[in-house]
Amino acid sequence: MSEHSTYTPGNAVEKWLDDRLPIIRFSKEHLMDFPTPKNLNYWWTFGAILVMCLVIQIVTGVILAMHYTPHVSMAFDSVEHIRRDINGGRMIQSFHAVGASMFFAAVYIHIFRGMYFGSYKAPREILWILGVLIFLLMMATAFMGYVLPWGQMSGWAATVITNIFAAIPVIGNPLLELLRGGFSVGNPTLNRFFSLHYLLPFIIAAIVVLHIWALHVPGNNNPVGVDVKDTKRDTLPFHPYYTMKDAFGMVLFLIPFAWFAFFAPDILGHPDNYIEFNAQVTPAHIVPEWYFLPFYAILRAIDFNILFIDSKLGGVIFFGGSILILFFLPWLDTSKVRSGNFRPMFKWFYWLFVVNFVALTYLGAAPAEGIYVVLAKICTAYYFIHFLVILPLLGRIETPRPLPTSISESVLGKAH
């Protein structure tokens, strides 16, 4: 029970519950009355949108699992059975498949917003680390889910991506066999992936709770990156101000979501995945889902030997490093100023990084030949240079613009 609580039970039932399980008090203090900076813009609504996406994925996933058969001889047909014969099955399957893409679109926006406004800086390092962990688990969950329809892209993506583990010295092959359940992708692989794909979203949900908890300790960052000086002047209660704003953002987000689900559910899928997996026939180009493409481009770009590391292991190191480096971002960026709005040099390099990331996405889908390979190497090099060279240097050489003394000053300054 909070020492400074303003909550008073409204009736005898509420009082009885409050004495035993103060859940209403908790929600009022930490959800409804939580002091939130008054200058948050719509980029901040993607946190709530991501929670909505996770709920959609879990609910639709549980329903799909009731009808899906995780066996190599029946998996492909069971997905078609869901789409054609189950009442509402086509829509549930569409919302789940489209939901994965929309989930990643929202999480990339959320991450890039955090990078621009310095939401990873002290005292929010744990908040950022938990966010990157969620992103990593999302990637694992999505990859395993992509294998389940057991189409040509599913089976061959499982073969290519699990082969990454074989490049790890000493433990690589045992780890690969453990993951596959054998020497090649087959029925044990499908069973393992189905089991983990069902389990991981609930682990993600648990870490999301920790992520929100870690947010509530220091409070929200904001577009000017200035700490709250006066709670009464600088903040608003989360409800009704931000609950309404988030709800509006969710509705806007659901419009393209619904368009894809109702009118173009297969547009983001690869045509080869509507052919049942055949281990004897390799597709011309093995391409993962679009949200893996930047990292897939990095994996393919490293095809030369470095010191005593062969090209395959080099690719795996750079592939893993491209994600793991995000965990260290709070310490790589040496600037004391959070918001990119007040960092003139950082702005240019930030947008160059965004363009570079989009280019990597395009190159991940392009064939690994000719000019595409050269460009992928250049973009991969810049990806790491941004984190390891540019961000540490900018904090030392950049002269930021003067910061407002408070959140209220920045809001009132705009009004006039």
Image (cartoon, rainbow, N blue to C red):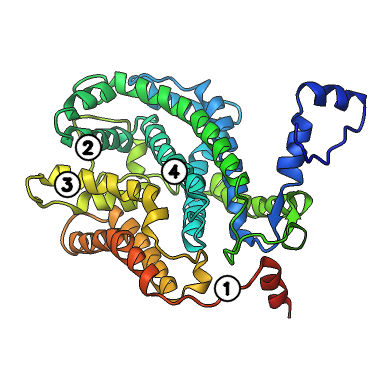
What amino acid is labelled 4 in the image? Phe
Q: Residues within 10 Å of mark 2 (few under 14, many from 20)?
A: some
Q: Where does residue 198 sit, x and y in percent of width and height?
A: 47, 26
Instruction: Locate residue 369: give its quadrant.
Output: bottom left
Residue receiving disc 1: 403
Specify the farthest residue to the bottom: 416
Q: Are marks 3 and 2 in contact (CB under 8 Å)?
A: no
What amino acid is labelled 2 in the image? Ile
In three-dimensional space, the C-alpha distance between marks 2 and 4, rounded to whole angstroms, equals 19 Å
Q: Where does residue 46 sit, x and y in percent of width and height?
A: 58, 52
Q: Residues within 10 Å of mark 1 (few under 14, many from 20)?
A: some
Specify the farthest residue to the front: 3
In three-dimensional space, the C-alpha distance between marks 4 and 1, rounded to whole angstroms, equals 32 Å
Which label lies toward us, 3 or 1? 1
Q: Where does residue 200 sit, x and y in percent of width and height?
A: 46, 29
What amino acid is labelled 3 in the image? Gly
The C terminus - image quarter: bottom right
Residue at x-position 51% and y-position 27%: 82
Q: Which mark is residue 135?
A: 4
In three-dimensional space, the C-alpha distance between marks 3 and 2, rounded to whole angstroms, equals 11 Å
Residue at x-position 39% and y-position 47%: 327
Which label lies toward us, 3 or 2? 3
Specify the farthest residue to the right: 11
Residue at x-position 78% and y-position 41%: 4
Q: Which mark is residue 314?
A: 3
Closest to the observer, 91 or 359: 359
Q: Earlier in the sequence, mark 3 or mark 1?
A: 3
Q: Are marks 3 and 1 in contact (CB under 8 Å)?
A: no
Residue receiving disc 2: 164
Q: Residues within 10 Å of mark 3 (few under 14, many from 20)?
A: many
Q: Is residue 87 visible?
A: yes
Tell me if 414 is positioned left or right of 91 in this view: right
